[in-house]
Amino acid sequence: MAAKRGATGRRLELGIQLRQLRENCPPVEPDRLRGMTRKAAVKGLSDLSEPTLARIELGELNFRRNVGNLRTLLKRYGVTDPELVQQLIDLNREAPTEEWLTQYRSFMPTGMPHYVGLEAEAVGIMVYHPTVVHGLLQTPEYAKAVLEMGRPIEDTTAEFIKRSVEVRMERKRRALNRENPVRLRVILGEAALRTPVGDDEVMRVQYEEIVGLAGEEHVALQVMPFRRGYRAIHDFAILDLGDLPSRVQTDNAWGAVSTSDKPREVDRFTRRFNAMAGAALGVEETIEFVKELARKQ
């Protein structure tokens, strides 16, 4: 177990181990050679449902309110090693690293708090965005302008925008300015840089911020220009979580954030990213491209 793993990392590890134990335990249902369904696992547990167990196995929840359910499941899975039982109970204890998120949860889309926790655990992130500068590259002024653009449609308040900008900047700080910063690779569609957001000064400062970040050793930026070649239509991010399974993150039209650790999905999005990286401008070309945009402001 990683020594400095945060709350989300602990929940992920607990969920992975519980799912493996459930899927490989002695069978209790007819016609099964091994393992049990979630329905069988939660049978008789009035305060633990199948959907809740699914969320626990995905690392979204833990047994914070009833460790007895964890002990019951381990017994049903045939876990008798007291050291393993204690290890899983220890993983179930919350780490304090996400307490800062509490004040912002009501301002975040569905699934975003979990994703922010994953982001903090990541050792590497590969991101593609075709139309907007990615959040980890944004300045506060650009972030505010993006949110203001949607305000008449989304009916958001000034307080919502203020708090959303705060959480975006805190995410950026925690990812890029920590002791061991995340290795960030970003591909931006040319439209993300040419679409006006805010006034000319907002764009000029944003371009300068991108150039500065692109000069950092742990940040690599490429631009996908307006020309023929493969490109994904929707934005996505792939998170390398070290010794935990990698995950892919996507958004939907309702603003919700979803992630998957299915190898097939992670591989599919990795192929997409690599195909676009091969067609995009190189890192040095990209820096010159953004500098030229800044000079024109």
Image: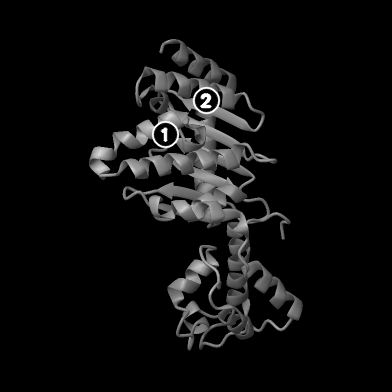
Which amino acid does the dot numbered 1 rest on?
Ala
Q: Nearer the viewer, mark 1 or mark 2?
A: 1
Does the image show residue 265? no
Q: Nearer the viewer, residue 269 or 105?
A: 105
| Residue identifier under label 2 | 210
Residue 240, image x and y in percent? Answer: 61, 47
Mark nearer the N terminus (1 vs 2): 1
Q: Nearer the viewer, residue 15 or 173?
A: 173
Spatial CA distance of label 1 from label 2 is 13 Å
Does the image show residue 190? yes
Q: In the rendered image, which quarter is residue 274 located in?
A: top right
Q: Is residue 13 above or below residue 135?
A: below
Total residue callouts? 2
Which amino acid does the dot numbered 2 rest on?
Ile
**Display colour scheme:** one colour
Instruction: Please state, as top left, top right, bottom left or bottom right, where the N terminus lies in the image.
Output: bottom right
Residue 289, image x and y in percent? Answer: 49, 16
Residue 59, image x and y in percent? Answer: 54, 63
What mark, if any, has residue 143 been given in the picture? 1
Instruction: Please state, as top left, top right, bottom left or bottom right, where the C terminus lies in the image.
Output: top left
Q: Residue at x 51, y 36 (%)?
A: 136
Residue 188, image x and y in percent? Answer: 46, 30
Secondary structure under badge 1? Answer: helix
What mark, if any, has residue 190 been given in the picture? none
Secondary structure under badge 2? Answer: helix
Circles 1 and 2, Cβ within 8 Å, touching? The answer is: no
